[in-house]
Structure formats: C-alpha cells, structure tokens
Image (tube, helix red, strand yellow):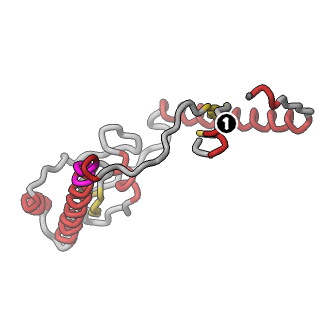
Amino acid sequence: MFNDDVIASGKIAGPVALADDQLVVFKVLEHHAPAPQSLASVREEIIAAIRKSESSAAARAAAEEAVKRLDAGASWDEVLKGLDAKATPAAFIGRGDPQVPAQLRQAAFAAPRPAGKPVYRALTLDSGGAAVLAVSAVKPGTPGANPQNDEQLVAQYMRRDREGDMHAYLLELQRRATIKTNPTVFQ
C-alpha cells in the first residue's frame, strides 16, 4: 500500500493476500507524508506506555517471587495474602473454555502434569499485569464423551479435505488453461 508507485499513480493496486482465502484490491485516495509529532502531543501516551511497561515488569517480578515461594512450600493463601491479590476458585478447564483467557489456557495445557504437588507458573498478561497459574490436577478427556465435539471435528476435517480438493482442481484448471489478461482494465 505504501509503495511509491502505488501512491503516485492513483490506480487500483493489488491484490494483497490477507489470508489463504482473502484478497484485497485497493486504491490510494489520500496519503499524508510521515512527519514527527511534537513531544507535547504524545507526552501522555508516552507516560502511559512507560507506566504500563514498568507496572507489568513489577507484576511479573512479584508473580515469579510468588512461584518461588510456592515451590519452596509456602501455602497458596499465605502467598495470596502477601501479594494482596484475589484468586479465581480452582476448577477444571477445557482447551476451548471461553471463561479463561486464551493465554492462561495455553500455559495451563503446556505445563507438565503435576506429580504429587501443584505445578506453578508466572505469566505476563497481554492486557498488562501478571498472573500466577497453579495446575493441581489433570483430568484426561474421554474419547466420544462429547459427540458434539466429535461431529465438529469430523465436519472440520471434511471441510479441509474439500477445500484441498477444490484448490488442487483450480490449480489443474489454471495449468491447462490459456489465460489472456487485459492490463487496461485496472486503469
């Protein structure tokens, strides 16, 4: 989009691939040259960014210290009281549980299976701040226990296979076809 030829020509440009099945064609209607902003106009944004960065680093350090204390044998309640923090009640979560942020779910499922005592992890949250994750038990899923999920997986695999077949078919058509383009169409 920011190619000098595209900006200067004012013609339709592209296509630009956004995803496997999404393309965008565009035309630059207006362009403003980059210019430095005055410090006064961005001062508050800079201060907020620095505060967020420093507070996230401090929260991460506190979470890592809490994990060290928990690994050393301190009780969960004692560590929470020292942090002046609240804990979400313990519960089993699924890989797609929308109640738990994706970052925490991924860390929980990446943690090793607890052997006798909980596994603790300190996480820096994308939204700012930090969290202490405790994995105290793992409950393996049972195949076929949720037929709705099984049906969704089958449908997903079938859709992927159909899309692959269609893609291969289109590639073969393009390989066999004689294609003529008209470059004046995009002027």
Q: Is residue 97 left or right of residue 87?
A: right
Q: Is residue 159 visible?
A: no
Q: Residue at x 19, y 69 (%)?
A: 65
Q: Is residue 174 left or right of residue 80?
A: right
Label total for image: 1
Looking at the picture, how far across and down is residue 127, in whole percent? 29, 48
Label 1 residue SS: helix
Name the image quarter holding residue 19: top right
Q: Is residue 31 visible?
A: yes
**From which residue to which does the magenta span run?**
42-47
Looking at the picture, how far across and down is residue 10, in whole percent? 64, 33
Q: Give the overall secondary structure of the magenta segment.
A: helix
The quarter of the rendered structure image containing the C terminus is: top right
Looking at the picture, how far across and down is residue 34, in whole percent? 46, 47
With respect to residue 57, does 85 lie above or below?
above
Between 101 and 38, the one lying in front of the other is: 38
The quarter of the rendered structure image containing the N terminus is: top right
With respect to residue 160, does 138 lie above or below?
below
Q: Residue at x 20, y 63 (%)?
A: 58
Magenta-span inclusion, residue 157: no
Q: Amino acid at mark 1?
A: Ser
- Residue position marked by numbered label 1 in the rendering: 9
